[in-house]
Structure formats: structure tokens, C-alpha cells
């Protein structure tokens, strides 16, 4: 005998036969073979709900029929809760039990369109006599009208008619424009477009709803009137004025759109009945005629309707028919009618005629949920799920013909074939995977749950995403049984079942955690290539751990015997010897909400909510379940552990703050930052709690952070940190070792990422250069801009200047705002406007930030600390030397992310300002200096400074001598200073090389300022001299015109000369040359 | 250009200043000019006189005068220089003029001495013959000639013409006197003793008597007692 392994006992092609989302679509034999007693049906009474079973309901129907008593039952339930299943089951059973006593009609939900419904009625009513012919003709006409191609236009036209025939809107904007609006060709095309409201309604009437449609009747929605911009534009030129007006008003008001949708929905029934040319009265008349005819035949009418929305438009007429009794004077001709109809939850409140509500004899609901359960309560526990699985799996193991034969032979439950009956692996299979009894009391029939077990079915079902999937029988069949078998069932034979946890079922969003996170490593290590499949097994089939218990054949790992592993072609692993370490409880079968998933339920809670039928089922002797585990030691799992477990499975990490704190502390202490050259400053500021975001943490994170994705590894790390922090010495040695290994491995793996993060501006932005380089260059250029450099400075000098300024920022007297402003003002005097502008743009705060940051990076003394700390001058010199080698060319860097640390954003911003403006500043500065030299030339020509100074002195002296008042003070500069300034500027202007030029410009500020003083002074000299010249020339002119003094003087001089000449001649001496009369 | 501009300004300022000074000192200039005019006349006359007279004067004397003239010339040259800045130079000019008076006087004295020397023989002759009858008729004319010559001797001639005029008068006087009183030495001695009131009869020498007689000059003489008894 071979081994029980890789065995597929179900027939793959039977999956879709057996599991169809519409009960009606399933063959009756399969339907009956898989019928599972509904766990809980609420009979709503004024005193409160009473739980009944489908058998009770069937009994009520039968009794009503036998007692000729009217019955009008409605079954409420959310989609998928089993309304159709129940009604169809009642129909089948009632039909069998009545044996022709009543005319039994079933209006199926299949396709669920009015057209289909009408056709079903016509088919059913073919038995009718001549009295019904006229009515049947009407129904046929209605069906034909629905199948007509012009249905959509007709529907719109009837809506337009309804706007004035039926009811006018309260809103003037709608009332005055709606008719033309609905008649406008552009609007009609929009309404008829794919998924437009008219298309939806028409489709519902003719084809029925699609799988992804809700069970609600189709209606207009406000967003149907959120019209496209192009349509609005086209309406301006092509549309009716009223249509354009209303369309524009709709585009601006949600309230108006809601109002219009509600208004048209109110007219929809009218439009539908007009469209199908069949009114509720027509339908009522049809059934009244039928009832009369049946009365004459002494028969009753039983009406089973899976979904009332199938009668959209004429549903009110149908309800009237069903509510009308066969008693009373006016109804004496009618036959008895028993009916049961399925309605969605809100139908009873919103559309069911108020005057007929009291005439409902049985108000039933399938929405009775278990405490705390949001979905329907038909599957409250694992046993209910197991029971349902057993029947469906049994049907899948049976050939269709076998089931059909069973059904043909009466379809009795006690005689239902058992697919496991002839299986060679029945014993080990049922032992390992469990089995459920689908027989009747005294005639037990156990069918295996393989390839599931009860726990697996329940675990998958309960973990279906509660946000998108309502937990109903339909969702159990669709998202668990059918999907797992269809997607993965065939892999059993190849030994690839089950798949990894994430692939098992698409409806499961949150993967469950291991009860002992430390077991992850064991699974990975021991499972080898099957690790993920083993994880799936222990997470869904097992108890969530790999604890090993028992020995030999009774040995289990994670609560699963070796048989289970081998059945799927997996080599059983050794697992972890379960010490007395408290364990998380196995996946409890009572959890029904996400909140409940985080806490174990007490056993008595299970009993309280478990229906009697299920208790009986699970308590049935002979069910062979896996050997029970020793009762788990009650453990206070602790909020952190539970949180991590939930998070591992996809939930939120609620206690992320504390966990993250431990994590960051571990990271901070575990990495040798100095090996990476990362200063303490960066470690302190980058490796802090708020800089780390754990995927799924409940709190939001602002700013830049390192994202740690959800992973089992991280979960293990968090768990290890929790255990180490909370339990410390109490940890078992092997757990301690495992935790340390986990932490070590994880840290080793993420260390490069963390280091990179510490060095980067933000997590998403790579470092454009080392921060120390960025800041040093910033500070060097700040020195340059602040005139802090000396001419012919060496790299060491430059570094010295930079460090001196940086040190000041960390000292007790950092640069103040007004000092910075003074620097800007000084720059305005000494440099070009661009230079001063750049200085102003940088601003004191950013300069302070850069300098302070650099000081801290280079380990300068902090504050007033007297600690002796070394300066990394080598690094600084290297950076400056490299800068010099590039001739001060600044490499372009991208903008630093605003979320980055201030030191990065400020440093980056300053650097970018320099990179963007430095070339221009240098060019402008050169022009600025040239302009000064040209101005000097303009004022003084080619004269040398000393000549100019002499002239200035002469002017002042002359004016003083002649008592000429003037504003010309003694120059504040001397000739040598003048000469030096001129020489410096000339040399700077002609200097080659960006770096040398920049340094000269920075160092030459005082010369520029002095030159400016000189120019201002010389301009004043020129001004004074010119003014003086003008005044003097005018005065000379005036004096010359007014006086004979000159002539007299000339005469005198001439006379002097004559006399002197005579005397000299007489004296016999040589003549003295006449001297000019001058001062 | 500042250097050039400043130079121009300085020049113009100086000019303006000078003009302004001139304007303010025009009276001083006028006074200086007047003083200069005055001294100019003196200088012109003196230098002309010196030019004319110096050939007739002692060379040493002339050299001394020229030396003094040179000094005065230097004084005025200095004054001229001062005038550029000090318009009130009349005092300096006057001082120079005063210094010029001495050579002027020296020249005049020397010239007068020279001229008197030239006139002196004619005066003596005139004194001897003044009482003679043949002289009596031209005595007035001769007196005028002498007085004119005496006047010219007091003021050195300024021009050559003046000098020649003086020489001419002197020559005329000599000729006149020679014509009316061509006397021998004995007659001249007798007449000198008569003019001096010392003649005695003993002085009536034959020659004298003859000369008296021949010229019927007896009435021209009278006999009287002398004052001295011997």
C-alpha cells in the first residue's frame, strides 16, 4: 500500500457544477446534495426575533397550505446570505411535499431582469385557461417591448413625459428645464452611454445585473449628472437652451445633482411601466385571473420569488397580489396563495408599500449576526464552515450522474452518497484533516474535509478582507472553497499545495502571524524550499506555531501530524520543542471581527454563540479530528506581542512608538558609525525615532524617514526586541540565542541602508556630496562673500578662516542678525550689487546653520565647552584643495528635498545659491572694479596718484590762499594708500583664474572701499574745481571790464622800467632786464 | 582731468586776485605813478645833464656821481619789484629820489665850478675896464652877458645846444672885452690898483700917462688923498 500523499479526491470539473453563485444556476441534484441547513433564521416578531430553521419554515408553508391559510412571507438578507438558496430549497421541498396540490411558481433570480421575469411568468402560466389569454398577451407585449432595440430612447421619452404628467420637480431649475433636458440629443447620448443611468436601467430590465452589480435596483445617481466638460461645451453651440442651462447648473451644484437623481428615481417606475406597456394593475389583474381559475380547480397558488427587484417597475402590483387574501366578500373567487419572496435589506423600508406592510404574515431575516459580527450570522464558527465544506467537497468527489441518480430516487439526505466511502486513504485522511457528518441522526455519514481541515476553512474565511467582502455563505464558497480549489487544487498532485501564504486566497489581505515569531527562523531553516508552504500549513491548517509535541506517530508540529505534511508532499520538519514557554492560543474559531482577532475567546464564549445544530454536529461521535493538543498554557501575550502578530498579518502596528524606540535604539547602538565617518551629530539627528516609519504603523509620519517595509523578518526583530526588553533574563536560552541571531542578521542586512539613510538628505534623495564637503564649501564661500579671505591665502589659511567663523557660531557670541545686515551693508559699499544681493539672499540664519553644522561636523568645541576636541583639518584641506584644483568651479547639485534635515536643506540651499550666482557675481564684481578704475581715469586721466594728490593739495591751498570758501575737506587718504588701492584693483581686474580672482576680490574689499572714498573725493574735487573755475572766470571777466587799474599798473611798470633803464644807462652799468610784474 | 583743471583754477584765481587787488589799490598805483612821474622828470633831466656835462668835469667826480646814480637805479628796481605786491610804493620812490639829489647837486656844483672858472677872467677884466669911457657905452651889454653866463653856470646844461650856447656867450663876452680894452700888462696893473683904491701918482707911469692921454681918459681919473698916511 502506497502512502497517502499528493492525492486529489475531488473532481476538478465538478467545482463549477457544485459551486455557483446563483442557487438557481446549480443543478437541482447538486443543489440538494450540497444543501447545508441554515444555521440561523430570525422570525421577526414585535416581541423580538425568534430563531427558526428552514424546516420550520417549510412546516409553516405546508401547514398553511393544508389549513387553506393565506401566507405572505418575506425573507430579508444581505446579498449572499442565502435568500435564494433558502427560497429555492423551500420551493423544491414544498413542490415535492404538495405533489400537485398547489400551482407552485418559482421566479428565479437568474439574470434577474424584468424581461426574464415576465418570460418566466408567461412560461409558468401556460397552464392557464382562456381567461388568462388577454393578460398573457399583455405580458408578451411587455416582454417584446423590453427586447426592442429602442428601449433606451423609449425609457427616456417616458421619463420626459413623467416630468409633466406625473410630478413636477420642486426645484424651479429642474422643473423649468427637465423636459428639454431629457429631449436634448447630446444629453440623451450621455445618459445612454456605457454605464450611464439609462444603459444601466435598461440592462437591468432586459439582461439583468452583472456579477459586479449590487443587489440594489438600478437607479439614477447624483454623479450621473456630473457631465463632462466637452459636453457642456458642445451644449453651448448645439444643445437646447434649457438643456445647456440645467447642465451648467448641475455642473456647479452637487445638491442639484442629488435632487435631480432623486426626482428621476421617483419617476422611474412610471417610466418603466409606460415603457413595457404593463402597469402594476395589469400584473395584478393577471394574477387575479390566475387565482380565480385555480379556485375553480380547487387548487392553491404557491409563489416563490427569489428577488423582488426582478419586478422593478411592476413590483408594487406584485406585492398587492401576494398580500391579497382569498377571504372576504370581494376576494371570494380567489384561490389561497402562499408566497415567500426575497428582498434586500432596505427594500422593506424604502419601497414596500406602507399600507401593505402589515399584511406580511412572516417577516424573516437572515441578517442575525453573532455578537460583534458585522456580516450575516449564518456561519458563526468553524464548525458551521466545516459542515458546509464537507457537503460541497462530498458533491465534488461524486460523479454528476451519481448525484442525479440520488436525486431522482428521492434525494433523501440519509441516502446521500458518500464520496469518501471507497477511498483507500479514508482513515488517515479523516484522522489528519478531519471529517464531518452529513448524515442523519442514527445514520451518520462522515465525509472528509481534505484538502482543507476545519481550521483552514475557518481561518481563510474569517480573514477575508472585511472591507470588501461580506462574510456570507456565498463569499465562503466563492472566495475560499472555489478559489482555493480552482487556483491551487490541481497542485496537490504535483506536491505544490498549499501555496505560500500570500497566494492562498486573494480575498485574504492580512496574513496571520506565527504565534511565536521566533519560529519564523525555524521554519526558514528547517523547511528549506518548502518553508513558505509549511508556513501556510501551520498558519491556516495548524496552530500558528511549529511547536513539536508528542512522539512517534502522535507527534505533531504546529498541531499538525506528519500525515498532513506528507499528504501535500512536504517532509515534516522537526519543529521546536515546546518548552513551558507560554504560547499564543491556536487560531480560535470564535473570532469574528478584526478586533476579536487580537484577543482569545474563552471556551464558554464559543458555546454561547454556537447554534444547537452545530453543537450537535461537532459533538457527533465518530468525528475523528487530529489528536487534541495539550491545553495551551494561558499566556498574557502582552500588548506588544499581540500588536506585532496583528501587524505581521497585515494589520496596523498600534504600539509602534515603543517598538520603534526599541528598534532605533538597537540600530543606533548596533552600528559603528565612526567606521563610516558619520559624526555623532548625524547619528543623533538622523537615527531617531521619528525618522523611522514602519509600514502599517498606526500613526502617521511627517517629514523624511526611513521606511521599513512589513516583513516577517522585521516582525521577528520587533518580537525579539519586545522579548529582550520585557523578559530579558527570563528568556529561554534557545529563544535568547534565536533572538540575538535574528537581530544580528537583520541588522547586518539593513546596515548599508541605514548608513546611507544617515548620510542622505532624505530617504528618497541621494546625497549630492558628503555633507561635510557641502558645508565646508558653503562656509568657504561664505567667507569669500563676507570678505573673510586674505590675498594669496594658502589652503591652510582658507581653512583657518572657515574654522574661525564656524567656531564663533558655536561659541557664546554667534553672529547676530544686525551684524549680518551690517555685512550686507558693507558689501553694498565694497562690492557689486550682485555680490551684496547674494549675501542678502543667503541670510544670517542659513549662514549660521552652515557654519554651526560644519563646526559640529568637524568636531569643533561645542558652545562654551572647554573640552579639547580635534579638528579634522586633513579632511578640510583635502576638500579645499580639491576646490582649488577645480579652480573653484561648483558642481551642480539637485535641490535638496524640503523634508530633509535643516543642515541639509540650509547647506543645499546655500550651495545652490553659490552654484547659481557665483559666476555672475565674479563677472559683475570684475565689471564693478573696472568701472571704478574707469571712473578714476575719467576724473584724473593718466595722472599718477601722487600727481593727483599734489593737484588736490594745490587746489585746496590756492583756494585757501585766495580765501575761496569751499567744501573740500582734507582727503582722508594719502598718496601711498591711493596708489595701493589703484594697483590692487588693476591687478584684480586682470587676474586670471576663478579661485585667485575670487580670493583677491574677497581680500580687496578695503581697497575697493578706499577707492570709492577716493573717487567720491575726487569727484568732489572736480566739482569744486569746476565750480571755482566757472566762478573765477566770470569774476575775471567782470573785473576786467570794470577797472583801469591794469592800465595804470602797466603805465607804472613801464615808467619804472624807463627810469631804471635811464639810471642804469647813466651809471654805466649793464642794463637790468625788466622784470614782469607778478606775484 | 583734475591736475590740469586744478592748475587752470590756480592760474585764474591768481589773476582774479590780482585784478581784485588792482581794483582795490588803484589810488595807490596812481600815487606811485605820480611819484614815479616826478622822479622820472628829475632823472631824465639829470641824466641828460650828466651826459652833457660829464666830459667837462673831473673824471673822478663823474665816477662818483655815476656810482650814486647806480645806487638809485637799484633802489628803483627794487621798488618795481615791490610794486607787484605793494602798490603803495611812492615812499620808496621818493626815497630814491632823495638819494638822487646828491649827485644832482654834485653835478650842479661841479658844473658851476667849472663854468665859473671859465667866466672868472672876463669878470676881472670887466672890473678893470668898467670905468673907462670907451667901455661905458657897452657896459650894460657886457653886464648882461656876464649875468647870463653866471646864470648858466648855476644849472648844468641839459643838452649840447645849451652847452654850446653857454660857450658862445662866453666867447662873445671875451671878444667884446678884447675889443674895448686891449690893455697891456702895465695898464692892467695900473687899473687894478685904481679899482682897488691903491693907486698913487707914482703909478702914473709914462705908459699910463700916454695911454691916458692918447685916449683922452684924463677925466676918467680923479686924484684924491689916500686914507692912509704913510
Image (cartoon, grey):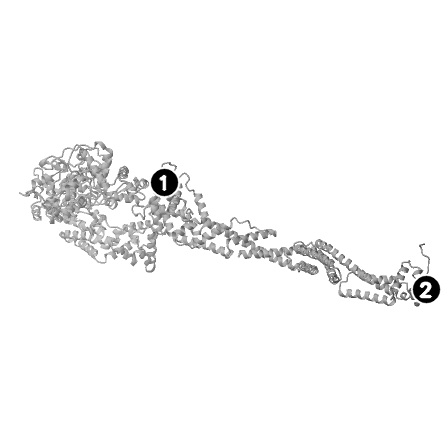
Quarter of the image with the C terminus of chain A in it: bottom right
Mark 1 sits on what residue?
Answer: A860
Circle 2/circle 1 CB separation < 8 Å: no
| Relative vertical location of residue B52 with respect to residue A723 in this rendering, above or below | below
- The x, y position of residue A277, in whole percent, is 22, 55
Residue A927's spot in the image, x, y percent?
44, 55
Label 2 environment density (alpha carbons within 10 Å; few <14, some 14–19, many ≥20): few
Residue A1029 circle label: none
- Which chain does the residue under circle 2 lie in? B
Left or right position of A182 against B76 = left
On the same chain, marks 2 and 1? The answer is no
Q: Is residue A423 above or below residue A962?
A: above
Residue sitting at x 42%, y 50%: A1000
Q: Nearer the viewer, residue B161 or A503?
A: B161
Choose between A665 and A183: the one closer to the eye. Answer: A665
Q: CA distance from mark 2 to mark 1?
A: 155 Å
Q: Quadrant of residue A1028?
A: bottom right
Mark 1 falls on what kind of element?
A: loop
A452 w.r.t. A951: above or below = above
Subunit bearing disc 1: A
Report the residue marked by disc 2.
Answer: B219
Q: Is residue A101 left or right of residue A788?
A: left
Q: Position of residue A1 (x, y in %)?
A: 4, 42
Vertical relation: A575 (above or below) A770: above
Looking at the picture, how far across and down is residue B203, in whole percent? 92, 61
Residue A537 lies left or right of residue A698; in this view the side is left
Residue situated in front as seen by the camera: A468 or A115: A468
Please say whether residue A46 is visible from this viewpoint.
Answer: no
* Residue farthest along the left direction in this orientation: A1
Amino acid at each position: 500500500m502506497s502512502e497517502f500523499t499528493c492525492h486529489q479526491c475531488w473532481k476538478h470539473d465538478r467545482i463549477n457544477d457544485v459551486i455557483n453563485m446563483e442557487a438557481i444556476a446549480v443543478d437541482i441534484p447538486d443543489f440538494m446534495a450540497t444543501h447545508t441547513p441554515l444555521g440561523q433564521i430570525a422570525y421577526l416578531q414585535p416581541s423580538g426575533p425568534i430563531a427558526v430553521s428552514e424546516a420550520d419554515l417549510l412546516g409553516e408553508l405546508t401547514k398553511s397550505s393544508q389549513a387553506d391559510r393565506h401566507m405572505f412571507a418575506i425573507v430579508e438578507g444581505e446579498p449572499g446570505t442565502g435568500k435564494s438558496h433558502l427560497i429555492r430549497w423551500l420551493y423544491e421541498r414544498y413542490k415535492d411535499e404538495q405533489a400537485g396540490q398547489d400551482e407552485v411558481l418559482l421566479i428565479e433570480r437568474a439574470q434577474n431582469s424584468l424581461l426574464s421575469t415576465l418570460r418566466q411568468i408567461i412560461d409558468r402560466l401556460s397552464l392557464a385557461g382562456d381567461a388568462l389569454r388577454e393578460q398573457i398577451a399583455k405580458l408578451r407585449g411587455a416582454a417584446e417591448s423590453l427586447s426592442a432595440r429602442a428601449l433606451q430612447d423609449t425609457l427616456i421619452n417616458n421619463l420626459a413625459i413623467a416630468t409633466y404628467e406625473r410630478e413636477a420637480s420642486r426645484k424651479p431649475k429642474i422643473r423649468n428645464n427637465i423636459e428639454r433636458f431629457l429631449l436634448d440629443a447630446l444629453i440623451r447620448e450621455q445618459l445612454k452611454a456605457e454605464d450611464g443611468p439609462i444603459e444601466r436601467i435598461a440592462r437591468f430590465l432586459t439582461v439583468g445585473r452583472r456579477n459586479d452589480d449590487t443587489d440594489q435596483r438600478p437607479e439614477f445617481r447624483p454623479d450621473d449628472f456630473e457631465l463632462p466638460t466637452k459636453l457642456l461645451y458642445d451644449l453651448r453651440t448645439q444643445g437646447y437652451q434649457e438643456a445647456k442651462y440645467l447642465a451648467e447648473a448641475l455642473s456647479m451644484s452637487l445638491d442639484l445633482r442629488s435632487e435631480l437623481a432623486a426626482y428621476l428615481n421617483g419617476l422611474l417606475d412610471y417610466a418603466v411601466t409606460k415603457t413595457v406597456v404593463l402597469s402594476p394593475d395589469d400584473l395584478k389583474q393577471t394574477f387575479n385571473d390566475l387565482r380565480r381559475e385555480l379556485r375553480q380547480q380547487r387548487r392553491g397558488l404557491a409563489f416563490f420569488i427569489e428577488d423582488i427587484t426582478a419586478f422593478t417597475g411592476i413590483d408594487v402590483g406584485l406585492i398587492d397580489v401576494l398580500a391579497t387574501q382569498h377571504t372576504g366578500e370581494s376576494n371570494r373567487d380567489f384561490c389561497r396563495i402562499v408566497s415567500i419572496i426575497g428582498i434586500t435589506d432596505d427594500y422593506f423600508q424604502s419601497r414596500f408599500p406602507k399600507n401593505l406592510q402589515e399584511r406580511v404574515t412572516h417577516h424573516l431575516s437572515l441578517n442575525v449576526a453573532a455578537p460583534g459580527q458585522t456580516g450575516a450570522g449564518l456561519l458563526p464558527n468553524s464548525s458551521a464552515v466545516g459542515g458546509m465544506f464537507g457537503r460541497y467537497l462530498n458533491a465534488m468527489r461524486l460523479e454528476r450522474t451519481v448525484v442525479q441518480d440520488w436525486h431522482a430516487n428521492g434525494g433523501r439526505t440519509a441516502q446521500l452518497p458518500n464520496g469518501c466511502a471507497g477511498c483507500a486513504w479514508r482513515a488517515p485522511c479523516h484522522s489528519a484533516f478531519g471529517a464531518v457528518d452529513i448524515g442523519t441522526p442514527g445514520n451518520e455519514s462522515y465525509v472528509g474535509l481534505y484538502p482543507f481541515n476545519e481550521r483552514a476553512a475557518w481561518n481563510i474565511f474569517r480573514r477575508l478582507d472585511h472591507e470588501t467582502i461580506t462574510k456570507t455563505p456565498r463569499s465562503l464558497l466563492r472566495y475560499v472553497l472555489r478559489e482555493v480549489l480552482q487556483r491551487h487544487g490541481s497542485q496537490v498532485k504535483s506536491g505544490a499545495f498549499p501555496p505560500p501564504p500570500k497566494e492562498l486566497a486573494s480575498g485574504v489581505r492580512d496574513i496571520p502571524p506565527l504565534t511565536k515569531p521566533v519560529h519564523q527562523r525555524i521554519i526558514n531553516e528547517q523547511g528549506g524550499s518548502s518553508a513558505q508552504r509549511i508556513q501556510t500549513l501551520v498558519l491556516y491548517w495548524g496552530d500558528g506555531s511549529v511547536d513539536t509535541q508528542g512522539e512517534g506517530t502522535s507527534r505533531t508540529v504546529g498541531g499538525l501530524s506528519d500525515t498532513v505534511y506528507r499528504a501535500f508532499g512536504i517532509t515534516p520538519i522537526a519543529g521546536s520543542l515546546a518548552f513551558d514557554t507560554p504560547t499564543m492560543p491556536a487560531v480560535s474559531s470564535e473570532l469574528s471581527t478584526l478586533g476579536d482577532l487580537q484577543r482569545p475567546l474563552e471556551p464558554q464564549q464559543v458555546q454561547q454563540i454556537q447554534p444547537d445544530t452545530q453543537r450537535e454536529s461537532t459533538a457527533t461521535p465518530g468525528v475523528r479530528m487530529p489528536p487534541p493538543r495539550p491545553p495551551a498554557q494561558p499566556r498574557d501575550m502582552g500588548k506588544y506581542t499581540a500588536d506585532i502578530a496583528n501587524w505581521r498579518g497585515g494589520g496596523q502596528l498600534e504600539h509602534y512608538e515603543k517598538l520603534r524606540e526599541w528598534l532605533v535604539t538597537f540600530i543606533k547602538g548596533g552600528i559603528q558609525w565612526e567606521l563610516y565617518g558619520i559624526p555623532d551629530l548625524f547619528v543623533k539627528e538622523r537615527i531617531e525615532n521619528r525618522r523611522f516609519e514602519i509600514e502599517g504603523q498606526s500613526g502617521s509620519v511627517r517629514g523624511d524617514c526611513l521606511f521599513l517595509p512589513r516583513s516577517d523578518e522585521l516582525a521577528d526583530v520587533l518580537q525579539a526586541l519586545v522579548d529582550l526588553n520585557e523578559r530579558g533574563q527570563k528568556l529561554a536560552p534557545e529563544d535568547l540565542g534565536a533572538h540575538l541571531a535574528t537581530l544580528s542578521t537583520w541588522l547586518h542586512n539593513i546596515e548599508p541602508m541605514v548608513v546611507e539613510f544617515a548620510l542622505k538628505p532624505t530617504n528618497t534623495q541621494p546625497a549630492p556630496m558628503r555633507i561635510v564637503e557641502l558645508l565646508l564649501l558653503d562656509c568657504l564661500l561664505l567667507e569669500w562673500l563676507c570678505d573673510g579671505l586674505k590675498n594669496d591665502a594658502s589652503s591652510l589659511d582658507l581653512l583657518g578662516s572657515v574654522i574661525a567663523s564656524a567656531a564663533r557660531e558655536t561659541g557664546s557670541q554667534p553672529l547676530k542678525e544686525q551684524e549680518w545686515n551690517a555685512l550686507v551693508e558693507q558689501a553694498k559699499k565694497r562690492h557689486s550689487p550682485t555680490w551684496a544681493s547674494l549675501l542678502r539672499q543667503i541670510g544670517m540664519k542659513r549662514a549660521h546653520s552652515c557654519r554651526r553644522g560644519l563646526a559640529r561636523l568637524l568636531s569643533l568645541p561645542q558652545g562654551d565647552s572647554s573640552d579639547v576636541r580635534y579638528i579634522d583639518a586633513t579632511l578640510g584641506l583635502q576638500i579645499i584643495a580639491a576646490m582649488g584644483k577645480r579652480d573653484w568651479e561648483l558642481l551642480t547639485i539637485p535641490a535638496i528635498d524640503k523634508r530633509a534635515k535643516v543642515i541639509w536643506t540650509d547647506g543645499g540651499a546655500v550651495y545652490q545659491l553659490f552654484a547659481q550666482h557665483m559666476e555672475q557675481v565674479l563677472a559683475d564684481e570684475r565689471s564693478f572694479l573696472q568701472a571704478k578704475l574707469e571712473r578714476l581715469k575719467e576724473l584724473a586721466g593718466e595722472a599718477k596718484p601722487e600727481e593727483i594728490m599734489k593737484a588736490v593739495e594745490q587746489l585746496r591751498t590756492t583756494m585757501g590762499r585766495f580765501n575761496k570758501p569751499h567744501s573740500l575737506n582734507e582727503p582722508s587718504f594719502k598718496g601711498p594708500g591711493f596708489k595701493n588701492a589703484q594697483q590692487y584693483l588693476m591687478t584684480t581686474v586682470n587676474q586670471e583664474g576663478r579661485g585667485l580672482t575670487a580670493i583677491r576680490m574677497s581680500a580687496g574689499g578695503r581697497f575697493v572701499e578706499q577707492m570709492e572714498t577716493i573717487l567720491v573725493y575726487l569727484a568732489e574735487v572736480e566739482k569744486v574745481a569746476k565750480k571755482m573755475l566757472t566762478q573765477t572766470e566770470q569774476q575775471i571777466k567782470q573785473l576786467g571790464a570794470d577797472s583801469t587799474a591794469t592800465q595804470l599798473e602797466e603805465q607804472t611798470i613801464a615808467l619804472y622800467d624807463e627810469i631804471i633803464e635811464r639810471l642804469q644807462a647813466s651809471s654805466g652799468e649793464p642794463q637790468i632786464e625788466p622784470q614782469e610784474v607778478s606775484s | 582731468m583734475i591736475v590740469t583743471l586744478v592748475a587752470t583754477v590756480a592760474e585764474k584765481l591768481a589773476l582774479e586776485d590780482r585784478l581784485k587787488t588792482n581794483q582795490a589799490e588803484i589810488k595807490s598805483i596812481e600815487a606811485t605813478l605820480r611819484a614815479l612821474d616826478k622822479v622820472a622828470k628829475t632823472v631824465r633831466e639829470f641824466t641828460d645833464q650828466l651826459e652833457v656835462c660829464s666830459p667837462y668835469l673831473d673824471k673822478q667826480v663823474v665816477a662818483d656821481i655815476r656810482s650814486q646814480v647806480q645806487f638809485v637805479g637799484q633802489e628803483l628796481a627794487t621798488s618795481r619789484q615791490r610794486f607787484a605786491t605793494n602798490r603803495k610804493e611812492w615812499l620808496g620812490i621818493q626815497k630814491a629820489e632823495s638819494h638822487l639829489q646828491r649827485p644832482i647837486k654834485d653835478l650842479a656844483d661841479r658844473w658851476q665850478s667849472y663854468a665859473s672858472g671859465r667866466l672868472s677872467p672876463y669878470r676881472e677884466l670887466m672890473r678893470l675896464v668898467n670905468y673907462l669911457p670907451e667901455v661905458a657905452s657897452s657896459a650894460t651889454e657886457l653886464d648882461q652877458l656876464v649875468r647870463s653866463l653866471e646864470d648858466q653856470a648855476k644849472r648844468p646844461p641839459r643838452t649840447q645846444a645849451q652847452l654850446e650856447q653857454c660857450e658862445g656867450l662866453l666867447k662873445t663876452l671875451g671878444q667884446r672885452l678884447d675889443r674895448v680894452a686891449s690893455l697891456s700888462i702895465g695898464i692892467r696893473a695900473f687899473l687894478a690898483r685904481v679899482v682897488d683904491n691903491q693907486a698913487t701918482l707914482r703909478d702914473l707911469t709914462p705908459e699910463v700917462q700916454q695911454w691916458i692921454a692918447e685916449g683922452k681918459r684924463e677925466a676918467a681919473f680923479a686924484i684924491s688923498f689916500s686914507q692912509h698916511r704913510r
